[in-house]
Image (tube, helix red, strand yellow):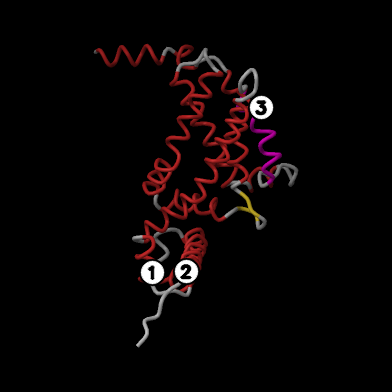
Amino acid sequence: MKKKTVSKVDVENSQQRIFASAERLFAERGFDGVSVRDIANDAGVNGAMIGYYFGSKQGLLSEVYSSHCRVLNQERLRLLKEFSQMKQGPTLEHVLEAFIRPSLAVTVDSHGRSDFTRLRAILSGENASLLEQLIAENFDQSSLTFVNALRKCLPHLKREDVLWRFHFLLGAIYYTGTGPRRIFELSGGRCDPLDPVASAEEMIPFLAAGFRAPSALRRSGRGTAKKVRKSA
């Protein structure tokens, strides 16, 4: 009896179906609300194929999440490199633009909020530790690249100052993507966070002003207080 062979095209099609089903189901139900069987049935494949290609359900989630992060990081770094090649180097606004514009672009698709945005939102409420792990694996290196670029634009600030403000930057991007209805309703539809271009145009100068503010550590004396407590 002749053994049936599986072509490379069949393998790729199966992987793509598994990936597409997992991305949609995870975004709709979260990680805990979806089983391997649910994904396999939706993709029309044998459940064993998920383990074979992705290792586990968490391995599949990691690949879904990472696929979006790779595109996002590549575009951020491409823009930063482009601005860095300017004669005077990148301004603070350029660094913020390189980080923010790609971030806002992935929050929406032709149907409104993207599956990636819904996935991040549902994971933050359902399994925060898993989300933190995925974020660290996919963004720690690129985040440090941008923190260093921001520090070059802000020589009057300490590293801790820039890290605090980078933290607030991340919060602004995240909430704009996951909670757009609030400002839309308050403004009667005139302010729409689902418009990534308009959101970036508002966000970049606002955050630039915040980044340029004097050091809160020096104004409050918190840095000195920490040293006193540590030596006590």
Q: Main secondary structure of the magenta part?
A: helix
Q: Which residue is mark 2?
A: 14
Mark 1 vs mark 2, CA separation in Å: 8 Å
Q: Residues within 10 Å of mark 3 (few under 14, many from 20)?
A: some
Q: Residue furthest bottom?
A: 1
Query: Residue 86: where, in percent of width, then height?
Result: 64, 23
Numbered mark located on residue 197 in the image: none
Residue denoted by label 1: 49
Reading the chain from its start, which is encountered first: label 1 or label 3?
1
Q: Mark 1 to mark 3: distance in Å? A: 49 Å
Q: CA distance from mark 2 to mark 3?
A: 46 Å
The range drawn in magenta is 195-208
Q: Residue at x 47, y 26 (%)?
A: 164
Could you say whether the residue bearing mark 2 is in a helix, strand or loop?
Answer: helix
Q: Amino acid at mark 1?
A: Met
Q: Quadrant of the C terminus?
A: top left
